[in-house]
Image (cartoon, rainbow, N blue to C red):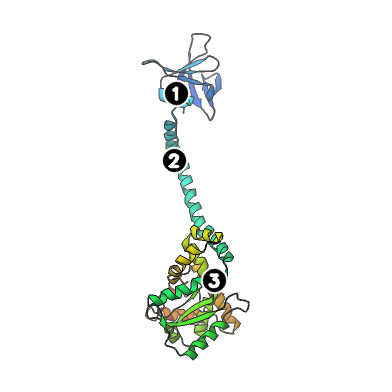
Amino acid sequence: MSLPGNYMDGRSPASRAVMLQRDAHHLVFTDGVHTHRYLAREVAFEAGLPGLPDKLQLPDGGVIEVASEYRCRHLSGGLPLGVRLLEWLHSGWQVLAVLALLTVIAVWCGYRYGLPWLADEAARRTPIALEEQMAAPTISLLEKTNSIRPSQLSQARQNALQALLLQAVPKNSRYHYQLRVVDSRDIGANAFALPAGQVILTDQLVKVAKNDEEIFAVLAHEVGHVEGRHGLRGLIQYGGLSLAVTLFSGDTTPVLAVAPIMLADMKYSRDFERDADRYAFRALAARGSSPCVLGQFLTRLGGADGAATSLLASHPGSEERSHPDGQQCPA
């Protein structure tokens, strides 16, 4: 901003027209020939009487008369704090827009990367005993709400399915796996894993499967969730920062209070589903079966009158899970 004024050096009554400017720390003015520079903090503003110009008193005795009080105050740094703040907001809206954008990016990055990292760390530090305490109340909640009922399959068939589950468990697993076969018209053809090696499998899914190899593929996928501690990690992510902090502090009461409700209705993220798929692919390959079995079975379930809606809700599409190497599987 430039401002016209009349400069008097304080030694003679003559004045000459000058143009004033202000940089970060200095008041600068020129008459077209000579340029003068003064520290702004050493320049005093003097309001003129009605009808008379305002003045800037220079430290060497010189005076500059300026007609515009507002612009004069601006150059001298004499504006009130509130006025200067409003002016900065008005002139610096681009800066504010950038700051707002950076804030949004920081929040998004914290949610997308920071919270999952924190959940992983908290899960890694959580003892298995605490995971075991989460599973039993979750099953009780499902029983009380009539979501699951005792299986209609024979005990011999349930024992065979338990053996099938154990075939999918890694030899060095930290968990004691237990399969719970249940009847559930509400859940339908489904399977899901709870923390600490508890796996739920419905009669409806067993009946839809063409053979045990398809059931094995689903059970291996659920073992992948358990080994990846996806239930606990998902619980911490959904519970947010406060839940993670309580686990770090060793206070398990809040976690145990909310775990049954959250685990009973949890849907895993796409990343967790892909991780469990990769585990199932490896397990199928290790027993000489095609990795395509899982994708083909789930694709068929998806077309069976929506029988596996909840099983497929958060899973990658069938085209993503057909083969671990991206190869096409036979239809």
- Residue on which the image places disc 3: 275
Disc 3 crowd, CA 10 A, few/some/many (<14, 14-19, 20+):
some
At a point 50% along the width and 27% down the height, the residue shown is 22
Which residue is at the front of the view, 231 or 103?
Answer: 231
Pointer 1 or 3: first along the chain: 1
Could you tell me residue 299's position as x and y percent?
A: 45, 79
Placement of 72 over or under 294, stated as above or below: above
Pointer 1 or 2: first along the chain: 1
Placement of 195 over or under 5, stated as above or below: below
Q: Secondary structure at mark 3?
A: helix
Residue 184 left/right relative to 173: left
Could you tell me residue 165's position as x and y percent?
A: 54, 82
Q: Residue furthest top?
A: 12
Q: Which numbered marker is on residue 58?
A: none
Disc 1 crowd, CA 10 A, few/some/many (<14, 14-19, 20+):
many
Q: Which numbered marker is on residue 72?
A: 1
Tags 1 and 3 touching, CB below 8 Å: no
Residue 19 left/right relative to 173: left
Tags 2 and 3 touching, CB below 8 Å: no
Amino acid on which disc 2 is placed: Trp
Which residue is at the front of the view, 139 or 94?
Answer: 139
The answer for how far apart the CA atoms under marks 1 and 3 are is 67 Å
At a point 52% along the width and 80% down the height, the residue shown is 178
The answer for how far apart the CA atoms under marks 1 and 2 are is 24 Å
Could you tell me residue 94's position as x and y percent?
A: 46, 42
The answer for how far apart the CA atoms under marks 2 and 3 are is 45 Å
Amino acid on which disc 1 is placed: Cys
Q: Nearer the viewer, mark 1 or mark 3?
A: 3
Q: Secondary structure at mark 2?
A: helix
Asked whether residue 327 is in view, the answer is no
Residue 49 left/right relative to 171: left
Q: Which numbered marker is on residue 93?
A: 2
